Each structure stands twice: as C-alpha cells, then as structure tokens.
Amino acid sequence: MKSDKIVVCGGGGFIGGHLIADLLRQGHTNVRSVDIKPFSEWYQTFPEVENLQLDLQEKEACETALKDARVVYNLAADMGGMGFIELNKGLCMLTVLINTHLLLAAKKYGAQRFFYASSACVYNADKQRDPNVTALKESDAYPAMPEDGYGWEKLFSERMCRHFREDFGVQSRVARYHNVYGPLGTYEGGREKAPAAICRKVIAAKLSGKHEIEIWGDGHQTRSFMYIDDCLKGTQTILASDILEPINLGSSELVSINQLVDIVEDIAGIKLKRSYNLSAPKGVNGRNSDNTLIKKYLGWEPNVRLRDGLEKTYAWIYGEMTQRK
Ligand code: NAD
C-alpha cells in the first residue's frame, strides 16, 4: 500500500537518498528517513519525508526509528571504499550494532519486510586471487573467509537476518551489492569508491591541466560496477520477492581498473600519464557477480552499461567540482 510506513535507515547516504527519491516517485506517502549525519550532510533530503537524525547503533534509537514501520530498508553502515574499510576494521565491525538493534526493533513492532544491504565483500578471499575471475556465485561465501572487518560484519549480519526470519518470523531479504556507483554519492574525503574516485581524479587533471593520474594497485585488478538505477530496481524487487537466501545484486560487466580509467578518460576527452601506487589499498585481485540466480528468480539482471552510468556520474561530479571552484 502506498500509505504503508516505509523506513529507510541510512537515508542520508548515497543509496538511501536515491531509494527515497524513487519511493516518492512511485507515490509512497509515508516514508521515514533515518541517518546519524546532521541534515546538512545528507546527500538528498525531501520535505515530505519524516527525517530523523539518530544513531542507529543505539537500541532506543532503533525503536524510535522503526515504530509503526511496515517495511524497513537497512542501508545504514559505517563504510566506504577500500581506502576506508582496510584501515577502519573496528569501526566497520561496530555496524553490527545497527543491524542487531534494527532486527530487534523490527521484531518488536512486527515489520512485514526487512531488507538488509549486504556486500560482495562477504565472499571467500581465496576465490578472488586471480584478476581473470570466475564470477562469484552465492555459495562462494562459504567456507567463510570474507574481507576482514567489513566483510565479516556483513556475513554475520546476513546470518542474523536469516535466523531472525526462521526463529522470530522477521521477513528479512538480503542482497549482496557489488560496487554501486552514480551521481549524488561520495567522491572525495576518503570514503569514495573507485568509479567516483577515478572520475574525480580525471576531472582534477582536466581542470588543472596537469595530465597525470595515480592509480591504486597495478591497474590489472578487475571488478564489476552497478549503476544506482539497477540497484534500486533490484533492491525493491528482492524485498518484495520470496527469495530467502542472500542473492547477488551486481553487474556482470567485468572491467580492469585500467579499463575503467580508459572509459573515464574517453568521456573527459583527455589522455593521462598513469602512475601506479602499489602500496595503496586495492582489495582483492578480481571480483565479478555471477547472476545465474537473480536471472532465474527475477528474469532480470542489472543491465545499465558501465559507459552510460559513468557518463552520468562524471557529469554530476564535474558539476560539483566546477561549481565549488
Ligand atoms: P553511504 O555511506 O552513502 O550510506 C550509509 C549511511 O549510513 C550514511 O549516510 C551514514 O551516515 C549512515 N550511518 C552510518 N552509521 C550510522 C548510524 N550509527 N546510525 C544511523 N545512520 C548511520 O553508503 P551507501 O553506498 O549508500 O551504502 C548503503 C548500504 O549498502 C551499506 O550498508 C553498504 O555497506 C551497502 N553496500 C554498498 C555498496 C556500494 O558500492 N555503495 C556495496 C556493497 C554494500
């Protein structure tokens, strides 16, 4: 029902902000957005939404957040790109408090659906050593050897969602996001991810006339990147589905970081001299999303071409950087 109370936790963040915009576009009238950041730092705010600034690591805050909630999206996490998660493992693990207290509150108030945003960082590191990857299928999360810190927290929280469903009837659904990118997200400050960071570096080179770029790692590491529109569609469809096990939500268009830079350079219309910082955080060597299951269940997979999504992302970051300048 369009009047059902929907709570977006982490609504001041990148994906949360876009999700709320999409819910409003669909005509939902009873949306609550919750985030720890001061309102001035939210990526998007909407006056027609009930906006709350709360620390969802606190149990009482989760109860305030989920009171009367019918649908809950848990997108709140203390996270960022590799530069953040490799250097802040303790902070990443503390996010376990958010999901724990939100699940307890969802149980208390009888929420009908609970979405949890997990990550490809749950996958076993041994399966990601070769840049010529075999795409990761859902069963590759076990035996467990996830990304230390952030990945362990995600894997544990996934598991908790499962047991709250089985034991207490909280109807949890879990998607494992693979690198989401798009406009209105973090592109500087240390928490940004590769697509935004590379757009920013290319734009900075273009604006300064200093045609050089530093790339983290040797540039051969491979990834797939999902555009925000695909993420929103997949998230809402998985939430409404009967898919009970965690499922991949990611693009299967694999590129190396060098190829990602090629595309952004092409969009910018410049060529840069590349240097490689081999001691910078770079994550696993290769990672892609096996989309067999999502295609089987939903007859769909994320399909926005990387080039198309990057054009929009580049344009937005360019606007931000030039306006500020
Ligand atoms: P984001 O950092 O933009 O949004 C997360 C939001 O959670 C932030 O606004 C932050 O302030 C908020 N938050 C952190 N701690 C909080 C607390 N204690 N109480 C309330 N709010 C708190 O990140 P995002 O890219 O929008 O990611 C959303 C979710 O998707 C996260 O769970 C993330 O781990 C997951 N995810 C994202 C990606 C990606 O590529 N963006 C990939 C895999 C998984």
Image: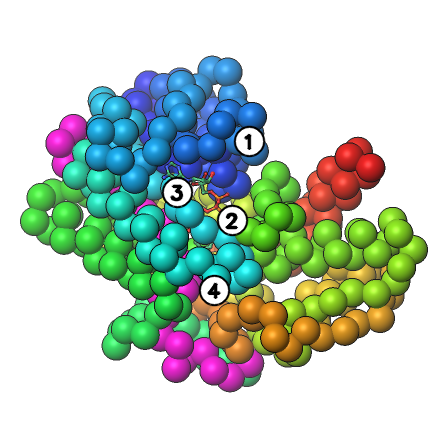
Q: Is residue 126 magenta?
A: yes
Tag 3, which secondary structure?
loop
Badge nearest the viewer, 4 or 2: 4
Mark 4–mark 1 contact, CB under 8 Å?
no
Whichever of labels 3 and 4 marks the residue nearer the N terminus, that label is 3
Q: Residue at x 41, y 63 (%)?
A: 120
Badge nearest the viewer, 3 or 1: 1
Tag 4, which secondary structure?
loop
Q: Position of residue 242 (x, y in %)?
A: 24, 49
Give whichever of 24, 287 is nearer the camera. 287
Which quarter of the picture shows residue 323?
top right
Residues at marks 2 and 1, CA–CA distance in whole angstroms: 25 Å
Residues at marks 3 and 1, CA–CA distance in whole angstroms: 16 Å
Q: Residue at x 55, y 61 (%)?
A: 83
Look at mark 2 in the image and give the residue it sits on: 230
Look at mark 3 in the image and give the residue it sits on: 75
Residues at marks 3 and 4, CA–CA distance in whole angstroms: 20 Å
Look at mark 4 in the image and give the residue it sits on: 86
Q: Is residue 316 left or right of residue 211?
A: left
Whichever of labels 3 and 1 marks the residue nearer the N terminus, that label is 1
Q: Would the CB of label 4 be found within 8 Å of ligand 1?
A: no
Q: Given the image, on which type of amino acid does mark 4 rest?
A: Glu
